[in-house]
Amino acid sequence: MRRRELTAMVSGLLWLGGWQESAQAGFLSQADASAGVRAALERGAVAAVGLLGKQDGFLGNPKVRIPLPGFLNDAAKVLKFTGQQKRVDELTKAMNRAAEAAVPEARDMLVNAAKTISVQDALKIVRGGDTSVTDYFAGRTRSPLTTKFLPIVTEATAKVSLAEKYNAVAAKATGLGLVKKEDANIQNYVTRKALDGLYVMIGEEEKKIRQDPVGTGSDLLRKVFG
């Protein structure tokens, strides 16, 4: 019987990914561990949306600022010398403003994904590397958020004539192998980059929680990640 109890105890410890409280408090419960991950996910998601979903959230942040697609970025060097730099700058600004306008739409979906995370997924996040949170959110929300973001991005970029001209030229360039298929449409490109930036910032917020759980002011996060 004792051997069976010991085996169960060891299995339980491994299943929790090695999480421990202090020696006096004993092992961290599965409920606390799962709740801690949910809290960390929700906090990270809300913080990331708040940082990005405002003016210059993308444009003013070098970590997520959306550059022109490779093909247009190269062409911009030529346009600069033909007096059309202003038009290129307008498109760059419009692309980033579109992302800033779309990101707030992600808040409810991300929060729901955080609140409904399974114990198994919580364990994967704890055992995973630096991209574990990004991988989780991307797997759960990228497809539906793409659907939500695209109309907003399309409306924002439609105000810039160079956007449609890019699409026309890029479509032909794709057939020649000069443009990647995923970069041939400016609206799809911005939507993808907006989501990439969102997940990057969620990951940044997770790092802060892991590095300084006490600083979060949350007893649960301190208990789980401290």
Image (tube, rainbow, N blue to C red):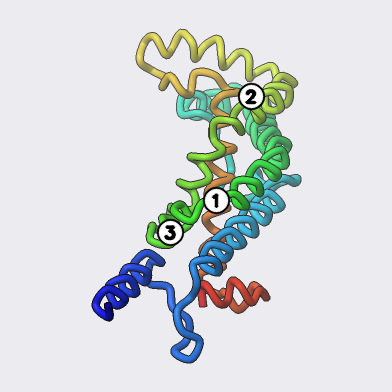
- Badge 3 crowding class, 10 Å Cα cut-off, few under 14, some 14 to 19, many 20 or more, is some
Quick one: 204 or 7, which is closer to the camera?
7
* Residues at discs 2 and 3 in contact (Cβ within 8 Å): no
Residue shown at the point (64%, 31%) measured from the top left:
95
Position in image of residue 116 (x %, y %): 59, 49
State the CA–CA distance, disc 3 to disc 1: 10 Å
Q: Secondary structure at mark 3?
A: helix
Q: Relative to residue 197, is residue 21 drawn left or right?
A: left
Disc 2 marks which amino acid? Gly
Along the horizontal axis of the image, is 177 left or right of 164? Answer: left
Residue that extends furthest to the bottom in the rendered view of this protein: 24
Determine whether the residue tagged by mark 1 lies in a helix, strand or loop.
loop
Residue with the mark numbered 2 = 83
Image coordinates of residue 22 in percent, x first then y, are: 47, 86
Camera-side mark, 2 or 1: 1
At horizontal 63% and vertical 24% (from top left) the residue drawn is 83
Question: Where residue 98 appears, x then y in whole percent?
Answer: 69, 33
Return the mark for residue 117: 1
Helix, strand or loop under label 2? loop
What amino acid type is highlighted by mark number 1?
Answer: Ile
